[in-house]
């Protein structure tokens, strides 16, 4: 009578072993799931930072352009994209004066000058409040600022050409030759952006 019982013991032991394995393995999966549930919480901080950057920005396109005006465009777009939205350049446009690869910014003004005209004639750097618009000013206009001579003005323009528009006045500290004192003397006389 023991022989028939031995026949059933081995399969029962195997079934218990498989069941125990599955239970312990499932417990490990729960830990993995709970850890993976934490990942979205950590990435939500990155999502909050991304939410601070507007999905759309407003860009004002002026000058020698088919349809001048204010355009709403995705924040990761380039100046070339806005030009295309505005119908492209007119036949008189001086395309060499525009950085088509530059990323757009909210409240940006893209001025397309007429061929043969200096940039400052078609895009005055001074607004009604007589502040120098540092992102659009010519070297001569920048030199009118307190404490800025030809070499510092050239450095500002070179930095602007290589790195894009200044987003805040403090970005001027990245320009060679501009320190805290110089920046303090400029803040009242410049407009950024």
Image (cartoon, grey):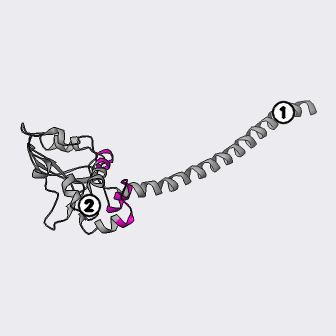
Q: Position of residue 180 (x, y in %)?
A: 39, 65
Q: Is residue 186 left or right of residue 64?
A: right
The residue that disc 2 covers is 192
Q: Which residue: 19% across, 54% down?
A: 140
Q: Residues within 10 Å of mark 1 (few under 14, many from 20)?
A: few
* Magenta segment includes 165: yes
Q: Are marks 2 and 1 in contact (CB under 8 Å)?
A: no
15 above or below 23? above
Residue pictured at 31% horizontal, 57% vertical: 167
As helix, strand or loop, the secondary structure at mark 1 comes to: helix
Q: What residue is disc 1 on?
A: 10
* 127 is within the stretch colored magenta: no
- Percent position of residue 176, x then y: 37, 53
Q: Is residue 192 visible?
A: yes
The image shows residue 185, relative to residue 115, as above or below, that is below
Q: Which residues are magenta?
A: 158-181
């Amino acid at each position: 009578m023991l022989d028939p019982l031995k026949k059933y013991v081995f399969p029962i032991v195997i079934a218990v072993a498989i069941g125990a394995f599955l239970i312990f393995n499932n417990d490990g999966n729960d830990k993995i799931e709970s850890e993976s549930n934490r990942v979205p919480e950590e990435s939500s901080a990155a999502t909050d930072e991304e939410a601070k950057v507007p999905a759309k920005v407003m860009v004002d396109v002026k000058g020698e352009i088919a349809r001048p005006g204010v355009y709403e465009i995705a924040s990761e777009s380039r100046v070339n994209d806005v030009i295309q939205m505005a119908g492209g350049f007119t036949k008189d446009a001086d395309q060499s004066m525009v950085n088509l690869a530059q990323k757009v910014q909210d409240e940006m003004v893209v001025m397309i000058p007429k061929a043969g005209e200096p940039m400052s004639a078609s895009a005055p750097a001074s607004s009604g409040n007589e502040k120098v618009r540092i992102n659009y000013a010519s070297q001569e206009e920048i030199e009118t600022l307190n404490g800025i001579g030809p070499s510092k003005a050239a450095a500002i323009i070179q930095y602007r050409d290589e790195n894009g528009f200044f987003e805040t006045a403090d970005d001027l500290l990245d320009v060679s030759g501009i320190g805290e004192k110089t920046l303090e003397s400029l803040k009242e006389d410049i407009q950024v952006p």
